[in-house]
Image (cartoon, grey):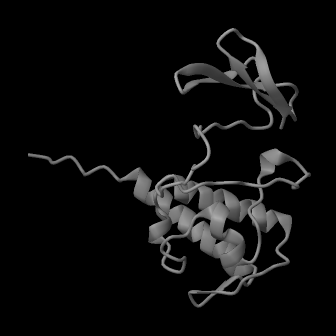
Amino acid sequence: MCQQPRPLVIFTVSRISQITRLENYLQTDGVLANGKINPKTDADMTLRLEITSVLNYLERRGYLKEVAWLPNDFETNRDMEKTLGFEPAYKYLGDNQNNFFANLDMQKPLNIEGYDVLLRAGTYKGMNPKEIITYDFEVRGVPYQLILEPVSAQENRVSLQNAKGDKLITTGL
């Protein structure tokens, strides 16, 4: 009786390939040597883009813990500059890298004392113009709606309206 060979776990191959790719880039530029990180504050944009891409890939799949020389609780957008010496960079943002990333650790309690509600919402440049995102919520039994809508490829509008549809406040992002 002939046994079928066990299938190769493609995710393992991918993980190993990406970690090797990451290490090769960092070793070539002198950021990683003998398993130790030597932060490089003057990293060129090509290195920043490649490292950000690989780290994000590994992070999305929960593989960062497999990278022995990274801190155990490493998060790309939070720790990359502190650990590697340079900030993340994203190709899809174009040449203008004057952007920021803000993140709250939603696993930890957030004090909202003095406020009625906390909403988690997201928007991004380049949103589809027909993609209007709405969040319905109540404050003391009164319904409201938060609306995120693209104005152009580079700007989004955030509005708060009451149940009658009256816009109470609007601002651009």
Residue ranking furthest to the right = 96
State how many labels appear: 0
Image quadrant containing the C terminus: top right
x, y percent for residue 11: 43, 53
Relative vertical location of residue 17 with respect to residue 32 in this rendering, above or below: above
Closer to us: 151 or 162: 162
> Is residue 167 rendered to the left or right of residue 78?
right
> Is residue 6 rendered to the left or right of residue 65?
left
Closer to us: 69 or 114: 114
Relative vertical location of residue 70 with respect to residue 98 in this rendering, above or below: below
x, y percent for residue 123: 71, 36
* One can see residue 156 in this view: no
Q: Quadrant of residue 31?
A: bottom right
Residue ranking furthest to the left = 1
x, y percent for residue 20: 56, 70
Q: Quadrant of residue 23?
A: bottom right
x, y percent for residue 68: 48, 78
Closer to us: 157 or 115: 115
Residue ranking furthest to the top = 164
Q: Residue at x 62, y 69 (%)?
A: 22
> Is residue 98 rendered to the left or right of residue 38?
right
* One can see residue 23 in this view: yes
Q: Residue at x 57, y 37 (%)?
A: 117
Closer to us: 10 or 5: 10
Q: Quadrant of residue 55?
A: bottom right
